[in-house]
Image: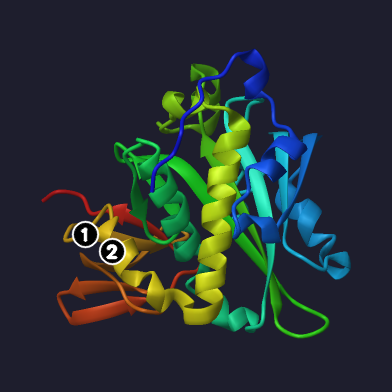
Amino acid sequence: MSFCLRFPSGSNLNLNTQKILLLRDRYGEQVDVEVVAETGSTNADLMARLSSLHAPLLRIAEHQTAGRGRAGRVWHSVPGGVLTFSLAWHFPQSTQALLGLPLTVGVAVAETLLALGVPVQLKWPNDILKEKKKLAGILIETSSAIDGGSWAVIGIGLNLVIPDALERDIGQAVADAPWLAQMDRNLLIAHLLNALAKAMEQFRQQGFAGFAERWNNLHAHAGQAVMVLDRGQVLHEGLALGVDHSGCLVLQTAQGQATVVAGDVSLRPAPAN
């Protein structure tokens, strides 16, 4: 995959719906696009509109004031410094069949960033890391569709340039990608949209099985000692072997192999002895 990078004058830092539409490929052309200057949450916006949607829709906000991460956590943002967008996509499968979707999205985003020269890895179940710090997060919400199947609203926040004050608000060290911040934002969004649309088509046909090997090739904690926590309580501890074809994490524990289903659990490196 090869990309032509465009380094912006000031205007290319602004998102423009028509420019993004023109940069879609044959996969991305399935998706309509809208850009807003500010909103509370692009995920909440799309979830509220699912009953009236008839095709995939990408909604991008220049600034989110009430962005959310997993387990109700706040997703901090700053205008121009964080790329925030959500994609609504209809699947013929039920919501229960979408277990591996967050990992599929992680693969699509991570491979796009790697092709753009940003060294990233994947943290189970749905974070993208750069230099062991969080660069991007994924939040997926689902709803049964009235006419069958289900809708997924896929929210993504990607750090471009994080000022010190925002990092203090977040309360932990995070990664950013100044190299991406120099790109035409419309081109960057189009690359991500095209990759996501292609991945959604493949997921519809194959489920996560078609992505498991690709995910494991990007696994940030492969072969490392980790802990799986739920609300601060350690559920499992062992060596992270990777993910199976359904997207579950496989651990080698003292009692044997354990399979962990993604939910509101979180993964942490185990403390050194």
Q: Which of 168 and 184 is in front in this view?
A: 184
| Amino acid on which the number 2 mark rests in the picture | Asn
- Asked if the residue under mark 2 is in contact with the one under mark 1, i.e. CB atoms within 8 Å, the reply is yes
Q: In which quarter of the image is residue 246?
A: bottom left
According to the image, label 2 marks what residue? 216
Q: To which residue does mark 1 refer?
A: 222
Q: Can residue 247 be seen in this view?
A: no
Above or below, comparing residue 113 to residue 146 in the picture:
above
In this rendering, position of residue 144 left or right of residue 140: right
Q: Which one is in front, 9 or 241?
A: 9
The residue most toward the top is 9
- Pair 1/2: label in front: 2
Residue at the far left: name it.
Answer: 273
Residue under the image location 59 percent in, 52 percent down: 25
Q: Position of residue 201 (x, y in %)?
A: 56, 70
Instruction: Check the image and tell me how it is coloured.
Output: rainbow
**x 70%, y 77%: residue:** 150
Helix, strand, or loop for circle 1? loop
Q: Is mark 2 on a helix, strand or loop?
A: helix
Residue type at numbered disc 1: Ala
Looking at the picture, tell me which residue is in the foreground, 203 or 137. Answer: 203
Give me the residue at 67% from left, 56% from top: 29
Q: How crowded is mark 2: few (under 14 residues within 10 Å), some or many (20 or more)?
A: some
Identity of the residue furthest to the right in this view: 52
Residue 192 at x, y percent in the picture: 54, 47
Q: Earlier in the sequence, mark 1 or mark 2?
A: 2
Asked whether residue 113 is in view, the answer is yes
61 to 235, vertically: above or below: above
Q: Rate crowding at label 1 as few (under 14), some (14 to 19) or many (20 or more) other CA atoms within 10 Å.
A: some
